Image (cartoon, rainbow, N blue to C red):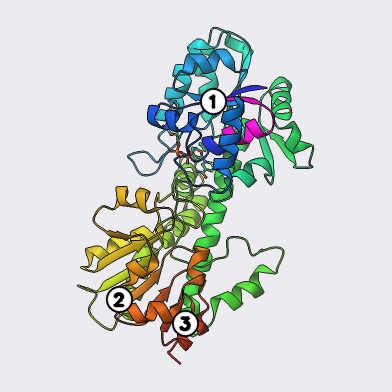
Amino acid sequence: MRVSVIGCGHLGIPHAAGMAHLGHQVIGVDIDAQKIAALNAGRTPIYEAGLPELLAKHTESGELRFTTDMREAAEFADLHFLAVGTPIDSDGRSYDTGQLFGAVRELAPHLTKPCTIMGKSTVTAGTTRRLTDLVRRLAPAGDAVDVVWNPEFLREGHAIDDTLRPDRIIAGVTSKRAEEVVRQVYAPILATGVPLFVMSPETAELAKGAANTFLGMKISYINTVADMCAAAGADVLQLVDALGIDPRIGSGGMKPGIGYGGGCLPKDVRAFTASAAQLGVPDAETLLRAAEAVNEHRPGHAVELVDAALWRELDGARVAMWGAAFKAGTNDVRESPALSVAGRLHQHGARVTVHDPVAIPTAARRHPELEYAATVEEASQGADVVVIGTEWSEYLDADPQAIGDIVASRVVVDFRNILDGQRWADAGWTVHRLGRPSLLPA
Ligand code: NAD
């Protein structure tokens, strides 16, 4: 099929590359000319394992190209994926749909032949209907243009894998004709047994928000349990093993830490909560607000734990923050808990040096007040405390003896519970672990 992907960000780039990989001819569209030039040269501004190879392969073959020209995309494609951003609005609660409606306003006047618009961005219930009205008014092809909602569930850090091998595909449609297009574009994926759920656009829109919100609630839940474990001298990781084995509960998303972050979960929980209020379901709002409040408290709580771990005043202390990305596997720092903690420590007078294997450029743009280091050794030089903020696997390989020789105090706070604590304690470190008993130097 000839498809366009409108919006080339964390979702759109992997999706465009993934569609080319499935055998479609793809044109990616973005308003950012610099980004488009880089993508046409096979370079990606986002870090995702496997993406550079896929981009290079399909841009070289000509099956995948990028443009800033919406008319070109409208003339080329029969199916238009919408993958533009839906950030949170200035009210802090609802989605800003400016990119979405802006892109459709730009696209629709060029739609002169029957085609399908397939929305992938995360939106509130009712958005597909409103976009359909707009398209039918603006597109010369009128009723021959279908609008479908096909929410995306990819996880950053696994974007290519999740695009090509998703858990499920959702089609929010109002006609058999539109459902057929969904079946056609995803045919190679559906042939592997991935389930397709066909439903109304409203159900599809809510299904995405409900999924992310449930994940947010689960994370907030296990984070509060971690705090209870800390207070009781218990071990949250052992507890999670015992809890997650129950098929009604499951272990997915049960990683205690400093809260959920990124470009999706925080805004999606906020918007879904606001949506509950708008739809007149106050119990849902109460439940979800609690999960949100827990998440908002996490960075402040983390700062208290770092303060308590220090042998000296926080003001003036040197902190080595290992990790800036909101999670491992991405250079995305939107609402990153690690950076939020780093920023707050800085505000309390600490001198914070941040290391991250891939996210330093993106982090430095958002937090220019922090210092950055290219290696963990450089970040840890003279540190009064090492803080693990992101669960990068390379931090597991750090040598506690060698790092111990360059820090001012052998104190580590592992907010991601990734270190082999005993190995670090044996090397003379005091190891603070979230929701688990601390280990003292051997
Ligand atoms: P992003 O900010 O990384 O990318 C959005 C892109 O759209 C930007 O490159 C921007 O320049 C472009 N854009 C804005 N207006 C445009 C227009 N009129 N025409 C063409 N391009 C335009 O956002 P993202 O993280 O990729 O998220 C996109 C959507 O997908 C959001 O609704 C998000 O909630 C949803 N989503 C994201 C993920 C994820 O992992 N990031 C996963 C599932 C769903």
* Residue plotted at (72% across, 64% down): 247
Q: Specify the label residue 204 is tagged with.
A: none
Residue 236, placed above or below residue 139: below
Q: Quadrant of residue 111?
A: top right
Q: Nearer the N terminus, badge 2 or badge 3?
A: 2
Query: Label 2: which residue?
Result: 307
Residue type at mark 3? Trp
* Residue plotted at (66% across, 34% down): 21
Asked if residue 224 shows in the view, the reply is yes
Real-space Cα separation, disc 1 to disc 3, in angstroms: 49 Å
Q: Residues within 10 Å of mark 3 (few under 14, many from 20)?
A: many
Residue type at mark 2? Asp
Q: Nearer the viewer, residue 216 or 157?
A: 157
Q: Position of residue 55 (x, y in %)?
A: 56, 36
Q: Position of residue 283 (x, y in %)?
A: 51, 52
Residue type at mark 1? Arg
> Circle 3 — which element?
helix
Query: Label 1: which residue?
Result: 65
* Residue plotted at (51% across, 34% down): 42
Q: Position of residue 103 (x, y in %)?
A: 45, 23
Q: Position of residue 226 (x, y in %)?
A: 50, 73
Query: Label 3: which residue?
Result: 424
Residue 133, placed above or below residue 270: above
Q: Nearer the viewer, residue 400 or 107?
A: 400
Is 423 on the left-hand or right-hand side of 25?
A: left
Is the CB of the residue bearing disc 1 within 8 angstroms of ligand 1? no
Q: Which residues are magenta?
A: 16-26
Asked if residue 151 shows in the view, the reply is no
